[in-house]
Image: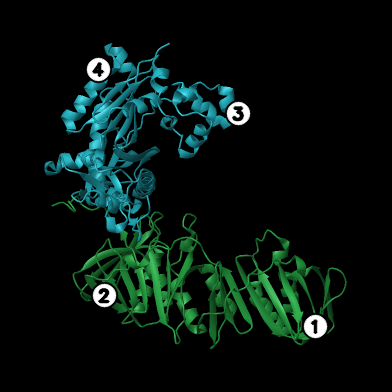
Chain colours: A cyan, B green
Amino acid sequence: MTWRRILHVDMDAFFASVEQHDHPEWSGRPLIVAGDPQARGVVAAASYEARAFGIRSAMASAAAERLCPHLVRVPPRHERYREISREIQDIFRDYTVLVEPISLDECFLDLSEYCARHRLPLARVARGIKTRIRQQTGLTASAGGAPNKFLAKIASDLKKPDGLVVVPPGRAEAFLAPLPVERIWGVGPVLAGRLHTLGIRTIGELAGKSPAWLELTFGRLGIEMGLLARGVDERPVVPWREPRSLSAENTFARDIQAPQTLLEEIASQAEEVARRLRGHEVVGRTVTLKLRYGDFTTITRSRTSRRPIETAGQIEALATQLLSRTEFPERPVRLVGVGVSGLLARLRPVQLELFDHEE
Amino acid sequence: MHLDCEKTVLENALGQVSRAISSRSPLPILGHILMEARGDELRLTATDLNVGVQTSIPVRVHEEGATTCSARLLADIVNRLPAGPTTLQTVREGSLKLTSARARFEVATLPAEEYPTLPVPERASFLRLPRKVLKAMIARVGIAAAEVDESRPVMTGILTVLESSRITLVATDGRRLARMSCDLEQDGGGEARVVIPARAMHEMVKVFGEGEDEVEVLFGDSQAFFRVPGIQFHCRILEGTFPDFNRVIPQSFQRTARMGRDALANALRRMIIVAQEKDSPHLVRMEFDPDRLTLSANTPDLGSAREEIPALLDGEPLTIAFNGKFVLDCLSVMDSEEVQLDLQDESHSAVLRPLEDSSFDYVCMPVRLRELSAEPVGAA
């Protein structure tokens, strides 16, 4: 049986570290990335210096400022974090296409093939990846390596910051046994309470229960908990990549010379692309029109707008303007495509609240 | 029970008490009206256990007694009877006979003993205020209460604060807050702080209707009672801590804008048509300049709108965005010709009020349009 080599990489205090890296004057200082305390902001990330004061994520900004009066508070710059996150994912993709981002600062990688091809142990590859992240971005990451996602995720959390823990195949049960049951995915305070009353406090104690007993007590969930407790997790790493551009195209049954037909097709493709922009919650900066003439020569014409492009109307207008920079309708067209690139996250308006919520 | 009454009087009373009947009642008896004939009165009672209404009407009692029958059935019948004298009489076990002119009905009843006991006020009334004033306060403040809030049920209520001779009503759904105060003619003689479901308050206003007289108000331990001559309305008091509202009513502003109420309301109604973004409903941008306010709204793939209205701004120009519906809700319950909007900046609360009237405040949180740039805050 071959073991998978799964790596879970978790950036250390990601948003806070990016801010400290971009603003060296803040490094070494307690810092939070958080919304305005007046407007019920909460802590999105806290630097390790701030954590020393007891400040944690999801705490109300106002509460954090009470804990540490010299706190540096920075409003979040999600676009910047996304940019760094893309850079880090590009490093991962040098090793494998099986990259599954969980959030901007967390990723699963399946390195089985890379390790086999280069005959390298997972720990060496993991160290190499950590070094490249630090050299390229100046940030540190904690990584966990294991034969599956569940173990890898737990392992990455054990030595933070800048840690690396690898669980070799065969050591899974021993590795898990002393950990509290709360470490298992899906075991929240309520379920943990039920397990405690049954005398089950560690993952080892849970692993000792028979699958039949677990199913009887907790149903389907019990079976899943039991498998995880014994270090069994078959879920694959599912690659996902943020699109760099979104487009639609269509080849006509016969070459087109009538402007009306082409304009209608452009309008309908603009609708399609706008719908997909919304689906991905992004806006673009550049519209590209692609034409293939009857003789198969293919041309593209692009235009970049100062304003974010998000609506079908905008896309259609720009694509139609681009048509004047082609040889249509003198040369008939067999294919037309409309695309939008330069994608950015759509900034969503936020209704502010009057009261701080208790956290 | 056997009595004669006037059809229109009975019809009117049934309309009042039926407001307390819930269409989704789990108990059949709660779909019934309790009728009690005593002395020269017929007392009608209805409740859904959250609110209750009791109305007394003058009748000629031949035989005292009590029974219950379906509120809807009784109202449907009485509404269609011809005007004139109507007779109600319990005839045999489980049946009520209604007679009017030549029409005769027999309807099923349930025994009065099965009807739930209604709460009784533990004390005498301790506050009186004109019906019109209470109605106006509820109409204005009630707009800010949450319709539903499963995690904070208290937000669906109106906080009533009584301090010696001043009564204040406050409601908030967490994004906007309305507060209105009124000085009482006589000292209320006590202090109280209770939260009453806004929905019940609105029902009460409808049950009481118009009138020049005063409403007697009484707060028990778990129920609030309101009385006008002939009608008593009671409802459950909400438990839970009402948020500390004084803290969120700003005391100082960088800017003040004045404009016509109708001009602003009509422009907002037009903007809202194209402000249909699902994530941020009714999002309307407001750009304040020294002599005008420019409103705009848009929804990708739907359309956009823009309108200027005259406004006077005291302070630096500002662009701020609101849920236009929140602003409109407030304008709709005001009656002054001009309104004043006190502003801090684009991410802090604004206060809308009738011009030069400090008895009513409407605090509204804006919608933040975009992320802020990274600038240190609180760092030396």
What amino acid does circle 4 point to? Arg
Q: Earlier in the sequence, mark 3 or mark 4?
A: 4
Give the alpha-carbon distance from disc 1 to disc 4, as whole Å: 97 Å
Q: Earlier in the sequence, mark 2 or mark 1?
A: 1
Question: What residue is shown with label 3?
Answer: A216
Res A326 → quadrant:
top left
Whether residue A328 is visible to the viewer of this picture, yes or no, is: no
- Are the residues under marks 1 and 4 on the same chain? no
Q: Residues within 10 Å of mark 2 (few under 14, many from 20)?
A: many
**Foreground pick, B6 / A265:** B6
Q: Chain of mark 4?
A: A
Q: Position of residue B163 (x, y in %)?
A: 42, 77
What amino acid does circle 2 point to? Ala
Point out the residue furthest to the left here.
A25
Question: What residue is shown with label 2?
Answer: B257
Res B170 → quadrant:
bottom left
Res A121 → quadrant:
top left
